[in-house]
Every structure is written in C-alpha cells, then in structure tokens.
Image: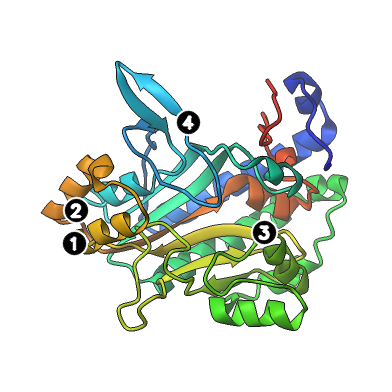
Amino acid sequence: MSELPPSSPREHLSKASTRHTLLIQNAIIDATRQHLTAQGFTELLPPIIGPVTDPGGRGSKQVDVDFYGHRYKLMTSAILYKQASLTAFDKIFYLAPNVRLEPLETCNTNRHLAEFHQIDVEIGGATREDAMAVVEGIIVNAVRRVLTTNAADLAALGRDTTPFTELLEWPFDRITHPQAVANLRDLGYEQSPDAEIDWQNEQHLSAKASRPFFITDYPKGSRGFYDRENLDDLGRLRNFDVIAAEGYGELCSGSEREYDYKRIVARIRESGENPAKYGWYLEMARDGIPASSGFGIGLERLTRYVAGLTSVWQASAYPKVPGVVSA
C-alpha cells in the first residue's frame, strides 16, 4: 500500500514539506485568479449541496445529506450549476470543493482524494478548442509563476524543474482517444476502445510524455450526459482530458456541453438514470441555455505535478484518502 497521510492534521501541517507544498499551491491559486480575471472571467462562489449533482463515473459514489426532509447531495462537481451561471455571465470560474467516495482500490493510485478542489471554468459560446486554449494558459501561467516566486520551495522539495522548460513551449500535443488506445497496445497494454483510459494506462502514457498533452474524442458512454456528442462523428464526444508528463496522470477533464433539451433527456435515459432527478436543470434547458465549453482542473493534482510530489494527499492541507478514516 502507498504511504498514507498522518492521522493528525497537526502532524501533517507541521511538516516543512507540507508548508512548502501549500505555498506552491497558494501561488497556483493566485496566478490562476489573476490570469482568468484579466481575461474577463467572473469568479463565483460554488454551491456545496443541491438536489442533484454530477452523476460522476468510474465507480465513485455520492454523499447524501438531509436538507429539511429532502435528500440532497454534496457536490461531486458543480458542472450543472456552471451551465446555469452562464444565464448571468459569459465566462465564469470557481475554486470548487468536491466530495466523491472513490472506490477503495483508488487509495493506492497516489492521485485520488475523496475530498478535493477543482479550478472549474465555463465559457459561453466557446468551442472545445477555445476551452483547451484556456486550460493551456492556466497551466503554463501557473508553472511560470511558481518557477518565478517559489524556487526555494521547489528546491526544498527536491523538484527537478528541467521538464518545465519544454512545458512552457505550448501549445500542448494532442492525440485522439483511438490514437491513445493504439499507443497503449503498441506498448503492450490492454485498453478497451469503448471506455475511459484506465488509471494505470493514463500513468503509462503520462510516463512517456515530456510535457502535458490532450486526449480528445472519448467514446460516448464513457462520460456524463453533459459532454456534447460530435454530430459529424456519432459515438464520439467533443471532449478532452489533459494528461501531465512524468507519470503524474490526468490533471483535467473538459468538453463542449450539450445544451439541446431533447438530446440531454435522451442522454440521461441512455445512461440509465431517471430524467426526473434533474428537474430544475431540465426546466432550465427547456427554456434555453447557452452553448458552452468548460473544464475542471484538479487543484491538488496540479499542485502534486508542479511540486513533484509522490502522492496527491501531500497537496492537501486536510487530506481525505479514499477508505482511510482521518480528521
């Protein structure tokens, strides 16, 4: 089993390595806020509970709370609320807390937390490629800021910053999901062409890369109903992941969003869910929601990558590893 965090917040927070890591994370947050605000984004405070949340995937479970006799959910992601926010603003972002009860086996991946934060962005009228450009800008800008202001923290953590020289030469490379599957098979790894890239296989692809790269065009059925299907290539989604270099794995997921009411209802039904669960969201979609694209970058994962940490829990002030009881 991978190393686990100390059971005491005091023990974890009093470590010099934790302090260096959180200072790097603080620089990433500050750089991201400045970068997005300068581009005209409005920061909103995200919801924490609601009658429905992102249906999620990969075996993670939601947490129910009693809201005055009604079953509400802790947010697994605020994707549905991000789309709603576009009825007020064209470009928004959150630094959003999320809770997902990830499968027990993920406690050994070094990159899963049950409680984590996302840099959540949604852009009205944007294409997938527009959103990918914003992702690149956030990551490159954050790395540049940390290299400039946190060199002592990086050195104290023993982070080799040589790979960042190439990272700063954006745009990142792009491959499609079928190309990723073919690359994995060439390396001798099994990978279903009809599913998400397995966690271990993401790590294999990541270990071969010298800078972050995009995987695009995941198969329909591998993601939530809100990822828009490519109407010129049915069965493929207009979405993407960002995979870090050096074996750190996935940093971000995003997509063009489905906004057509009838297609949303059909996709919900195809996923085996009851559309009635999404009452307020479907009512909004029936009245009309803007076309958009957006994404969520895992803040702790990005911090782990930039700081060169072994495990993502090291990038959390109060880590909650799946299946591990902690304060």
Q: Name the residue under label 4.
A: 63
Q: Residue at x 34, y 67 (%)?
A: 228
- Cα distance between the residues tagged 1 and 2: 9 Å
Instruction: Tell which of 214 and 90 is nearer to you.
Output: 214
Point out residue 110 in the picture as x, y percentages from the top left corner: 74, 47
Q: Residue at x 38, y 62 (%)?
A: 227
Q: Mark 3 points at which residue?
A: 199
Q: Name the residue under label 2.
A: 285
Quadrant where the C terminus is found in the figure: top right
Q: What element carries label 3?
A: helix
Q: What residue type is labelled 3?
A: Trp
Instruction: Tell which of 148 and 96 is nearer to you.
Output: 96
Q: What element carries label 2?
A: helix
Q: What residue type is labelled 1?
A: Lys
- Cα distance between the residues tagged 1 and 3: 33 Å
Q: Mark 1 points at which residue?
A: 262
Query: Going from the N terminus, do you reach mark 1 or mark 3 first?
Result: 3
